[in-house]
Amino acid sequence: MRVFAAALGFGTIVALGDAELGAYHQFVIARIALLILVTLGLNVLIGVTGLLSLASAAFMGVGAFGVIIVLQKTSIPLILAVPIVVLGTWCVGWALGTTSLRLSGFYLALVTLGFLVAFQTVVQHGGATFGSGYGLLAPIPTIFGHSLSIEWVCILSTFFAGFCTVLVWSLVNSRLGRAWRTMKANPVAAELAGMNITRLKTSAFAFSAAIAGFAGTGYAFLQQAVSPQAFDINETIDHLVYAVVGGLGSTLGSVLGPLVLEELPEYMRSLQQYRQLFFGLALILILVLAPRGLAGLVHDAIDRVAPGLSRRTQATVSRLLGTAPRAGEQPALKARRRGAAATDPETPALEYRDVTVRYGGLTAVRELSFAVRRGQIHGLIGPNGAGKTTAINALCGLVSVASGEIVQDGEVIRGGRRSVASWRLAQHGVARTFQTPLVVPELSALENVVAGLHSQLRSGLITGTLKPRFVRREERAARSLAAQALERVGFDSDSAAPVGSLGFGELRQLEIARAIVTRPRLLLLDEPTSGLELEAAVAMLEQLRSLQAELEEALTVLIVEHNVPLLFSHCETVTAMIDGHAVITGTPDEVRAEPEVRSSYLGDQLIAEGVGRKAGEEMHAYAE
Amino acid sequence: MRYVTALGAAIAILAASVAAGANAASSSPITIGCQCDLTGAAAFAGIAGQYGIQMAISQINAHGGVDGRKLKLVTEDSATTPDGGTLAARKLIQQDHAQAIISVASSGASIPAAQVASQLKTVYIASAAGDPRVLYPFSKYVYRGDSVNIAASAAMMVKLAKQRNAKAIAVMTDTSLAYAVTEKSLFLKDASKAGLNIVTAKTWSSTDTDFTSQVQAVKSAKPDWIIIMAYPPATAKFMIQLRNAGVTTPVLGDQSLPVPDLISLGGSAVNGMELLYIGSQVLSDKTGAMGKFVAFFNKMFPNVDHTAYPNSETVWAYADTFVLADAIRRAGANFTSDSLVTALDKTRGFVAGKGKVFYYAFPVGLPRTYNPNDHEGTRVLGLLEVKGGQLVPVTP
Amino acid sequence: MVAINVGGLAIGAIYGLMAVGVVLVFRTTARVNFAHGEVLTFGGYAYWLATKNGTSQALELALVLALGIVIGVGFFVITHYLLGRSDELTVVIGTLGVSVVMLNAVQLHYTDLGHRVPGWLTGYSTVPIGGGEVVPSNTFVILGVGIVSTLALHAWFQLTRRGQAVRAVAESREDAALSGIPVRRVLLFSWVAGCAFATLSGLLLAPAVDVYPSMGGDILFKGFVAAALGGFESIIGAMVGGLLLGLIEVHSNQLFGAEMKDLISFLILLAVLLVRPQGLFGRTQLRRV
């Protein structure tokens, strides 16, 4: 329980520090502590998960009003009332989070704003229970018969702020945190890496709501009174300012934001009335000049003054946490699988049966039928608009199948009555790359690949935060496997480096590493060589072949490609599509010979793509 | 955290030295805290009250201060919310080291602020808050200033209802204001005891702008007298919509309403309204003490909106500042909160400007008496009428 | 009964004007301005200051519209240049920051006190509507100006070449650019027009609710709900959505009391965004994700 101990320790230290302060400053720090709690939650929601919510003040208010009402109307003691209220706020947050499944960006912000408005209506007009519109006085908090003085409320608030800061930091650096960041970067890639988007979104909302609700209970006892105006849009905007100025996505930022923005006014008493104005200006300035906030500035300063320090610190922390791979340890992950390779070797690994896909008023795929044998590298070619990517998207569940079936190892995964959810495909052994590499910019290269193992790991919100032994073990195993996968694809850059410094080819390798780290049965590559020079493209395909040979369980690969000669030389079988329909499936020679294929795009297509006239002529000769 | 601890230590040392210095007979200024609603629904009162306190303090300092010590004013905005009130009180006492607080704030903000002041053993005079709960539960440090305990307002409303022979009364209350909720429940209790007939009781919130449903309710209930317990902005809008709907029923407004804002926002719709009033003279009276008061105010604050200020809150806060100053004088230059309480409790019939010490003050306040178990301020309520865009007295 | 419906339509016209301003900007820039309410407030204060100084009514209108244009340019500069490369989240937060600055600037300078202003063109006059009841003439000015300006704008979009250029940019920026349409100028126009509609709303609303710092912010949410009813893409839909919302509000006022109206707006918003995202009048069946 190292994380728990560290959290307790840190919380105790800051609480003791607060206890040493004079009465007024103690109070100020306690207020800041509560704001830190809210900002930690808001940061998880907006910074890490990328969901814009304007409801943070409402959740704080639910906690504040809730705890007073529970204490006044029932005989539940404080020590139970607070967890009950926090749990209630969690549920409300979860409910609001379900709207984020259908909405995002500014529409989501609008709905959360509506929730804030609804909350205001309830506390302003909910009658005497809610203070008749002018607010409620908080009862004096008592624990086991002892009433808590304001000083004790201050000390406890500060303790919990420190405690939760460590816990949230651990959460953000866990499986769930990686999944949130991946979903923020690209939800589609996240789903195909095995991440349940629904669960991710609602859990982010619920968590941020609950921690804000907890801060609200503290507010009620610290301020000794609550009013509707304390939890309105202005307050929510304040929270946003703390999060943004501090640094979105950074736990350090969640602490720096409230600390700096609330401490500074204490020293500029004469300018007190301009406080809100300064907040607004600070927000705009940070957004324009320093989007990563104060935390970003701190990190940049450290990197300039002591380069490599942050890297070494990270490494030390990983070792202390027990997540860094250990020499001599050969960790393994228990595979979590659904379905299995069919026993009959004749069963195709993948089969499309008369699949039709319509969207945007067009029929993109018409009665597409082809089969891929187990262990083969199968190419899918066709001119632009032939429906190749759509066919793959249909398999992945990104578009719906109007009629027909897609069958994997004898099991229907699309079409018919039973359809496998996109995020479950990873457990079925399906992995995919995309036309443009969809990597997560906030994670290092290694962590990007570890994210691919999401469906194979078992830590959740609580276990991910507290990191008990099994979690540490599986993190070590995951990192080790990820490092191996990177090696296998020929990635030779620094895997701990931020992804932004990598070249395009390396990003491609990264994406493939992420796809193969789970040892999939079926690997879908969507234009994997596009953007690569010929040499690199050939090297990559060679790597794939050797990889396939190494694996024990047969790996079937489906490649969508424009570079036809390359495909022909590396694929065992090919399907050619024209206008959404499969014209022929066979060996490269058979396909090359098919008249419709030749007339429609071989040669002509290459010249049109600017491969070069000489190359085009060469290809013509090759095709002969 | 280290710098914060160091700063906290520095403040503690500074505070101790200031306290120590004050204990030696020094001429350091006396810090008076002003907790005012400078923003929010009660801003019309808080801003006005702050001017009144500033005016009194400047006069006092111009005449040598109290016991040879000048008065220094520190202000915190309580924003018409209870948590704003507690924060303001805490800041004034713990950060600014106010030795006494005068508040010009709604009851909602003042009730919890008074509690905090009491916990921190500082004298608190609530100049504008009429809710009984300000003084209940009783604390020796908390006093009511020029504002009347609204139990008296409720009683006066019943008396007037009987005088006017009102057979069907409609009651309009702003439930976003603590004092109004209390006033309504006190009135309804007194009214039922007196056998009065209440035909409808509707509510609104300070921020409302559309009063269609309340007006419709009044129209269908057909009262012969309407009582309003609310602040000026919403009341003015309600009156406009009420008169537009063709309702000509006479209306009584409570003691929050006799301010110029009501007329500038309500225009002709508020003509004929009767209003409960606390004060010895009407502000529009250009003669006597009030005339001099207004003239001095206009000279001291030339750039202020003179259609809105001064208002009755200015007068109350002005008078209350002198009550406090007089008690400080009697407690001596090195007064403590407890000795100040003792001095305040000996206040008998005090009116600044009518004695030898504060002869220069304008005698616009009502006589003040405090006892160790009675900290209520004024008990006298008068009646005004809105006539021709002015507030004029009515003999009830 | 008449008074209630007239009142409902009038406040609905204000919501509609707000919504039109929001949609004007959103269609071409894909950005929503959370400071739109404060722009209305600025318009209201400008009108109040103009009436205090006894200017002519034509000048009052000109001043208010000119302010809207200036503010629109400001927002264009902020969102297109300063935050040009930022994602949607950042721009939303940025406009929230601007709204804080604008609101506090007004509050600091003019305090929270309200100020009564006469109706534009009509002063404090009223119109009898039967049964001994009167309604402020300004109510009809709101309705008239609101509906006429929306129809005029719609006609301009449909019939003039410049208007069609704007619609082209709304459809697809790339295609419009390829057709030689000056996209940046169109975006600037959208901001300017949107903010001018907002300040105009301020001039119309002020006589009904007095001029105070949060006059615009208080109804911003309603403006968004009205825009959602129009699917965030149709000007006519935005105005009709607003009128509908206003009517629903006054009638719910009667039935459920004044307290419920914000709650009802929230429920309408949820229903529209989750069940029928194209609103009542939008065409495209978009996924809002």
Image (cartoon, coloured by chain):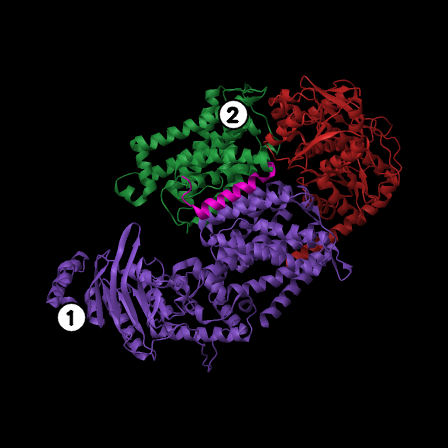
Chain colours: A purple, B red, C green
Which SS type dominates the magenta stretch?
Answer: helix
Q: Give the farthest residue toward the front.
A: A417
- Where does the magenta region start and end? C257-280
Say which mark, if any, is on residue C139: 2
Residue wearing tag 1: A589
**Dot 1: chain letter:** A
Three-letter amino acid code at the position of disc 1: Asp
Mark 1, secondary structure of its residue: helix
Say which amino acid is labelled 2.
Thr
Q: Which quadrant: the C terminus of chain B? A: top right
**Residue B223: where, in percent of width, then height?**
70, 25
Name the foreground residue: B103 vs A340. Answer: A340
In the rendered view, does B284 fall on the left or right side of A328?
right
Q: Position of residue B23 (x, y in %)?
A: 83, 47
Q: Is residue B217 left or right of residue C273?
A: right
Residue A551 magenta-drawn? no
Give left or right: position of C213 versus B82: left
> Along the horizontal axis of the image, is A360 left or right of A308?
left
What subunit carries mark 2? C
How many angstroms separate mark 1 from mark 2 (CA)? 80 Å
Inspect the magenta stretch and tell me whether residue C274 lies in it. Answer: yes
| In-front residue for pair A202/A160 | A202
Label 1 and label 2 in one chain: no
Q: Are marks 1 and 2 in contact (CB under 8 Å)?
A: no
- Residue B319 placement: quadrant: top right
Q: Is residue A296 visible?
A: no
Quarter of the view holding residue A256: bottom right
